[in-house]
Amino acid sequence: MRGLDYHVRLWGDAAAPKLFMVHGWMDVSASFQFLVDALTKDWCVIAPDWRGYGLTRGPATDAYWFADYIADLDFIVRHYSPQEPIDLIGHSLGGNIASHYAGVRPERVRKLVLLEGFGMRGGKPEQAPERYRRYMDELAQAPQLKPYADFAGLERRLLRNNPRLSAEKAHFLARHWGTEKDGGVVLLADPAHKVVNGTLYRVDEAEACWAAVVAPVLAVVARHSEMLSKWIDEPEYRRRLAFFRKVRAEVIEDAGHMMHHDQPERLALMVEAFLAEAD
């Protein structure tokens, strides 16, 4: 697909209703395993590893561009559901991709679930020279991924980052997020993903895509996430939600940004109830 051998993880019976899930930055499709396990209905879950993540090898490039993810999703949807509109879940970066796609191809999305995928802080034109300069400087530095001595070291890092994560889940994630390299373990990701985007986040362009979405939208944030403090604030979040024609906002309690790890049962209940509602 588009010159890449795309890895797509499938759960369930191929004849069951299709549910697409797309992961976030520095993540992999296997990250949805706990959410899939918590689903109570029969689904055919379709979850790709984005280009340069997990088991999808990246192209010969030193940087990645947002539009490529949207195009990749279009090819994936056309392959697995050439006719029927889809139910689509996106987390973080995946949510931002999914929300753009649903506006660009509104006829292809039946229901849209956004898990903290509402974009970044908007850039200002006067910031462009510094952003391009930073982009070129980082390209010249050849980014590297942090190495760990072994999978146990990666597990410890995951547990430090997320105190709600169980040891069992950390063990599972470490062996799907990581890979052995040069006697140690690194994340299954192209280091080029660490290079800053060469262009600023253009909120006005995102708003135009959101306004074109016709599917009902479930927007979910986690009570203890940094999304509404580090990336955007509460008023800006509410302002962005207003661009969607049919949107419901929900909060997952006792969860951080990786809500599908922290509270998969609560999230599954919320998602399946939304998907079951009449259009």
Image: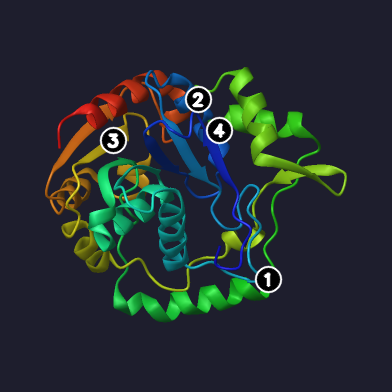
Residue in view at x 67 percent, y 33 percent: 174
- Check if mark 2's residue and mark 3's residue have beta carbons within 8 Å: no
Q: Nearer the viewer, residue 136 or 97?
A: 97
Q: Which one is earlier in the sequence, the residue at label 2 or at label 3?
A: 2
Identify the element where label 4 is drawn. helix
* Above/below status of 201 relative to 49: below
Q: Which one is earlier in the sequence, the residue at label 3 or at label 4?
A: 4
Mark 1 to mark 2: distance in Å? 37 Å
Which quarter of the figure is the N terminus placed in? bottom right
Q: Mark 4 sits on what residue?
A: 161
- Is 26 placed left or right of 186 in the picture? left
Mark 1: give few (<14), some (14-19) or many (20+) Cα within 10 Å.
few
Identify the element where label 2 is drawn. helix
Q: Amino acid at mark 3?
A: Val
Q: Which one is earlier in the sequence, the residue at label 1 or at label 2?
A: 2
Count numbered badges in the picture.
4
Q: From this viewpoint, is residue 28 visible? A: no
Mark 3 to mark 4: distance in Å? 21 Å
Q: Amino acid at mark 1?
A: Gln
Q: Position of residue 169 (x, y in %)?
A: 59, 23
Q: Mark 1 sits on what residue?
A: 141
Mark 4 to mark 2: distance in Å? 18 Å
- Is 244 placed left or right of 33 in the picture? left
- Check if mark 3's residue and mark 4's residue have beta carbons within 8 Å: no
In terms of image quadrants, where is residue 161?
A: top right
* Front position among marks 3 and 4: 3
Q: Mark 2 sits on what residue?
A: 34
Q: Which mark is residue 220?
A: 3
